[in-house]
Amino acid sequence: MIPPLIVVEGPDEALDAAIAAVRASGWTIRDGFRALNGDRSRTVRCATIASSSDAADALLAALGGAGLVVAGRAPREVLDRLLDDLRHIGPVEHRVGPPTAAGPAVSEEARLLMARLAAGMSLGEAAFELGLSRRTADRRLAEARRALGSERTAEAVMKAKRFGWLG
């Protein structure tokens, strides 16, 4: 059986739920990424990713055959790189827990713009419908991407959906 590779970004309850599900599937949970002798079979390593060093340790554990359930607390670029690297090893379950608040603060125009992009409009069409210049729409979109920690519009739209911005 393929060991699970789970990255949880969200509250501790989401991590606890992932750990409970892995245990219920018959896997043994071990804290930290450093493997002990003879601890490869049906072992899942569990720890927090707070830095690129933690991400490297997690990746080495996965390359050694261990499963992972990790709490993603590192900067966005570190977690994105880890997720990409883990996908080369096997299927990755990336859980993004519910936001603790309404999400990052952005203007109502940015939210309306994101909703129209999610509905399939082009940026120009969305700007026209909202009575914005294309340049203002570009700025509002950049504002939303920055607030959501996304480099790409598609990723920002997905995160905006999670925050309930899009209805």
Image (spheres, helix red, strand yellow):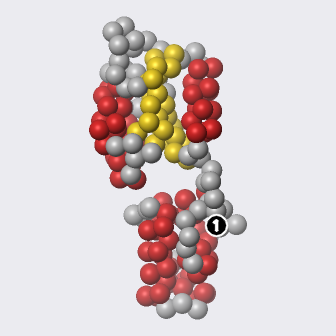
Q: Quadrant of residue 106?
A: bottom right
Residue at 56% over, 70% down: 105
User: Is 156 or 105 nearer to us in this picture?
Assistant: 105
User: Is 10 or 156 nearer to us in this picture?
Assistant: 10
Residue 99 in the image: above or below residue 146: above
Question: Which x, y percent locates residue 41?
Answer: 43, 12
Residue 11 in the image: above or below residue 124: above
Q: On the picture, is 67 further left or further right than 112?
A: left
User: Is 164 or 133 nearer to us in this picture?
Assistant: 164
Mark 1 lies on residue: 165
Residue at 49% over, 83% down: 137
Give, as a three-letter code, the residue at label 1: Trp
Question: Which x, y percent locates residue 49?
Answer: 40, 39
Q: Secondary structure at mark 1?
A: loop
Q: On the picture, is 75 further left or further right than 128?
A: left
Residue at 34% over, 43% down: 51
Does the rendering let one see residue 12?
yes
